[in-house]
Image: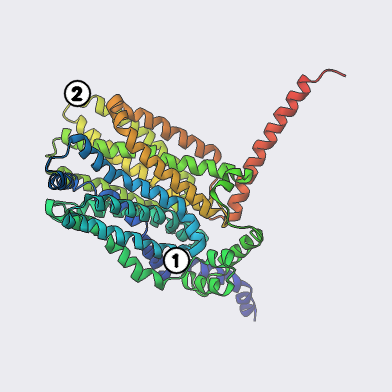
Amino acid sequence: MNKDRSETEYEPLLKELKTRKKFRFPNKTLLLAVCAACIGGTFQYGYNISIINSPTKPIQNFINETWLQRYNTYVSKEILTLLWSSTVSIFTLGGFIGASTGGALAIRYGRKGTLLVNNIFALLASLLMGLSHPTGLFELLIAGRFLIGLNAGIGICVQPLYLGEIAPRRLRGAMAMGTSVFITGGILTGQVIGLKELLGGEQYWPILLSTSCIPAVLQLIILPWFPESPRYLLIDRGNDLACNKALKRLHGSENYHDEREDMEKERLTALGTQSKKPWELFMDKNLRLQVITVILLNSAQQLNGINAIYFYASYVFTRAGIPDATIPYVTIGTGACECLTALTCGMLIDCLGRRVLIIGGYSLMTLWCICITVSLTFQEASPWVPYLSMMCVFAFILSFGLGPGGVTNILTTEMFTQTARPAAYMIAGSVNWMSFFLIGMIFPFIVNGLQQYCFLVFLVICSLVALYIFFIVPETKNKTFLEIQEEFDSHSRIKLCKRESIESNGDILLSPPL
């Protein structure tokens, strides 16, 4: 009798322990939904950044030949440089426009719906770039690069939004890391496909650029089988039945209740509130700290020196005695290195938390900036110094992938509630693409002017961002979006109280005696 009674008493505890054990790994449907969203989302971003590097010479030759056929004269060096730089940089213009409109599209058509419609741009871009050579129209190549940039901009805005909203609270970090994993996976795939043995040969470049259609087709086939974001269905559309159905599929029919409760609380706080526009976030004093943080983190992601590392990689590898023909294969190692750290970050982020990884990543990058500056300065001092430079290059990439490369997008998701999140991603994406364009424009001048000392500039940026996060940004691990919002609100109130206290003390000191 006592035995039966004790079993009854401990039954809720045993049930909870079983539930926790069962929740250790994400639902299979959830994992597949992440892959389906990413393959046509941020994978396209990384892939199309990477594949344009291999056919640089063949495309310039094509422009020259086309110009000769049209005007019976060779194109001048200045015009050729202009046309080539336009082909490369118009990708960032398309990305900026895509990021600026992605949030509005996600509100109107849904997260999943926007990702599916977005593939139209990728398919059309692949068609134009593939036809540019047969038709002798390099303008089609430029137009195609603009459209694939538009696709990448929308994808990098909407896909993290979808991942952050479909993941359960305690796995939100790991699931959202799909963004970083697929970006780095896209870069690595582009590096491999661009080898001369595959599609990097001179005659294959139109096929290489047209392969962007493959991820788009895969997403169009796979993603429709998975549900829309439950938060979007409940809070934005008020469809309770569809929300429950989506939650059961993504989290399991027995384990979705906690997430449903969190969503209901957020829905109640959002009653009567329309989705915010980007300019409304700037005007909202309660969100000012989050907006500043998003702008800082997304600009730092491009301005922290990772582009300089990739620029100097070939030089460092050459100084280390690696033959020029072998350097493309060693460069693949840098892509594999970043992809590996993104996977590692995904496994650690829900254990160590966001702050530890991003502060640690920026702190280590600060250290490697010093080491790289010293090793490049004394490159001729000893035969082993170039190998030290190689180690520093890989260490810098590891530090970036383990922290800033992976955590930035997750923080953008977690710092805002449902009504503000799409607008926050529009701001984040726009800042990211503007910084991408800016570093592309001014980076050559920085390198030419400062040489290896350019890393001292990046050292300052990395250290300042690490300090800002340490003092301002709270830990968001395993917290609801409302709890995170309250933490930022309390931080803002503390600052306001301190300011009022200082002002009141000043008034007392300045007031005349009675």
Can residue 472 be seen here? The reply is yes
Which residue type does callout 1 highlight? Gly
Q: How many marks?
A: 2
Residue lying at the far right in this picture: please name it: 514
SS of the residue under disc 2: loop
Check if mark 2's residue and mark 1's residue have beta carbons within 8 Å: no
Residue found at x 38% / y 46%? 405
User: Residue at point 41% right, 38% down?
Assistant: 362
Q: Is residue 145 above or below residue 23?
A: above
- Whether residue 361 appears in this view of the structure is no
Binning the other alpha carbons within 10 Å of mark 1 as few (below 14), some (14 to 19) or many (20 upward) gives some
Residue drawn at x 48%, y 64% is 109
Report x, y in % for residue 47: 29, 53
Residue type at tag 2: Ala
Residue 113's disc number: 1
The quadrant of the picture occupied by the C terminus is top right
Q: Which of the numbered marks, if any, corresponds to residue 381? A: 2
Decide if residue 100 is on the left or right side of residue 458: right
Q: Position of residue 437 (x, y in %)?
A: 36, 40
Percent across and percent down for residue 195 are 16, 51
Question: Residue 493, how many percent across, how many down?
Answer: 67, 41
Quadrant that contains the N terminus? bottom right
